[in-house]
Amino acid sequence: MSANNIATTNNNLDNIFTHQSCKVFEYASQLKNGGLFFKHDPEVNLFAIIAIHSTALGPALGGCRLINYPNVDAAVEDAVRLARGMSYKAAITGMPLGGGKAVLIKPDKIEDKEKYFKAFAEFVNTLGGKYITAMDSGTSLEEMDIIAKYTPYVASLTVENDMSHGDPSPYTAFGVLEGIHAAAEFKLKKNNLKDLTIAIQGLGHVGHPLATELHKLGAKLIVADTNKEATDYCAQKFNAEVVAPDEIHKVECDIFAPCALGAIINDETIKELNCRIIAGSANNQLKKSIHGEMLHKNGILYATDYVINSGGLIFAESLYNKNNNAEVFNKIKNIKSSLLNIFAESNKQNLPTNLIANQIAEKKLRDHGDKI
C-alpha cells in the first residue's frame, strides 16, 4: 500500500488509538484512488476522519456524519464504506463527482459548536477541494452554515441560489418514492401504490416525508422509530401501525423501507424478513455484499441503496454547481428508469441487483482511470 493512502493533520493521535486494535491501514488499502485523513483537535474535542474513495469523476462529495461509535475501527470502517457508496452513487447517476465521507466521533459534549465546526472546516480546507462536505446523520443546516464561514467546500446551506432550502433530505425522499414505484412496477406489476403495505424503519428527515407521500398515494403504513413523538404523529395523521424498532423488519408487508442507519440486512435479520421488496433510503443497508445474493435467492427484490437514495446527492451537486431546481427534479425522476434497468439486468443474468449496480458503477469509474 502506498504511503499516500493515509495522512494525518497533526502529530498526536495517541488518544484516539489508545487501547484500540485499529485496522486503519487495512481500511486505507481499500482506497486505492483516494485516502484516509485524520484530524484531532483536543481543544474542542474533535476526532474527525475523512475518507476519499475516488476523485476520477470530480471532487469527492459526501456528508459529514456526527454519531457515537463503539471504537475507532467502527468509525473508520463506516467512513470507508460510505465513501465507496458515494463514488458508486455519483458514477451510476452520471454526476461529475467522486465519493467521500466525513465521520466525526461524537464527544460526550460539544462545549462550543462554533469552534468545533470551525476546526472541522479547517480540516476540510487542508484537502484543497478534493472533498466537499454536506449534511448527514447527526448534522444539520445549522452546522453546515457554521462550516461555510471557514471553507467554501460545502454543498448544503440554509439558502442557496434559486432554491429555497439547502436540506437534501426531501430530495432523497422524492428519489426513494420514485424507486418504490419502480420496484412495485417490476416485482408486483403495480403502477400505483394504493393498498400496498409499506413498513418504514426510521421517521427522520427522509422517513417522515416519505411516509407523508406514501399515505397520500393510499399505501398502508407500518412504522418504527425510537422517537415516540414521530411514531405517534404517523399513527394519528396516517393511521399507521406502530411497532418496535427491533421488530419492523419482521412484519408482513409488500415493501420494507429502511430509512435509518445501515447494516439492517445481516445474518440475523435476513432470516426474519417477511417482505417482497426492500426499498429505502439508508446507506449500506447490506451488512455484507453476500446478503444481496441471499435476498436474490430468496426472491426479495432489493433496490440498491446508493441508487434509490441518490436524490440527495443530485440535489447537493446542483447546489454546489449552481444548477436550477427543475434540472434537479428531472434527474431524480431518472432514478426510476435506472432501477428498472438494474432489475431487468438482474433478472436476465440471474444475479443480485447490488452486483449488477456495482458492475455498472465500476465500469464508469474504470473508464475514467480508476483502479477498482
Image (cartoon, rainbow, N blue to C red):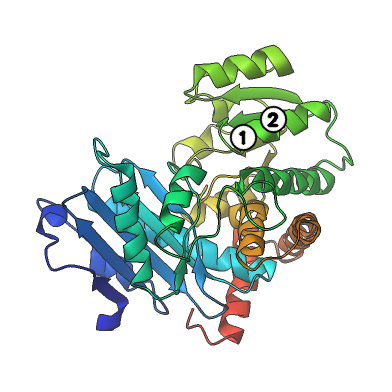
Crowd tier of the residue under label 2, counting other residues whose Cα lies within 10 Å: few below 14, some 14–19, many 20 or above: many
The residue under the point 55% across, 54% down is 156
Query: Viewed as shown, does residue 35 lie left or right of 200?
Result: left
Classify 313 as above or below 30: above
Q: Secondary structure at mark 1?
A: helix
Task: Say if mark 1 contacts mark 2, CB within 8 Å.
Answer: yes
The residue under the point 61% across, 24% down is 223
- Asked whether the viewer can see residue 40, the reply is yes
Crowd tier of the residue under label 1, counting other residues whose Cα lies within 10 Å: few below 14, some 14–19, many 20 or above: many
Please name the residue that numbered disc 2 is placed on: 211
Tell me the tag on residue 207: 1
Residue furthest to the top in view is 236
Classify 167 as above or below 92: above
The residue under the point 23% across, 47% down is 71
Query: Viewed as shown, does residue 371 lie left or right of 254?
Result: left
**Residue nearest the viewer, comparing 56 with 107:** 107
Instruction: Give the percent coordinates (x, y) of residue 225.
Output: 52, 25
**Residue nearest the viewer, comparing 141 with 172:** 141
Residue 208 in which image quadrant: top right
Tell me the tag on residue 127: none
For badge 2, the amino acid type reads Ala
- Asked whether the viewer can see residue 300, the reply is no
Residue 127 in which image quadrant: bottom left
For badge 1, the amino acid type reads Gly
Query: Viewed as shown, does residue 297 lie left or right of 120?
Result: right
Query: Viewed as shown, does residue 328 lie left or right of 230?
Result: right
Instruction: Give the percent coordinates (x, y) of residue 352.
Output: 63, 58
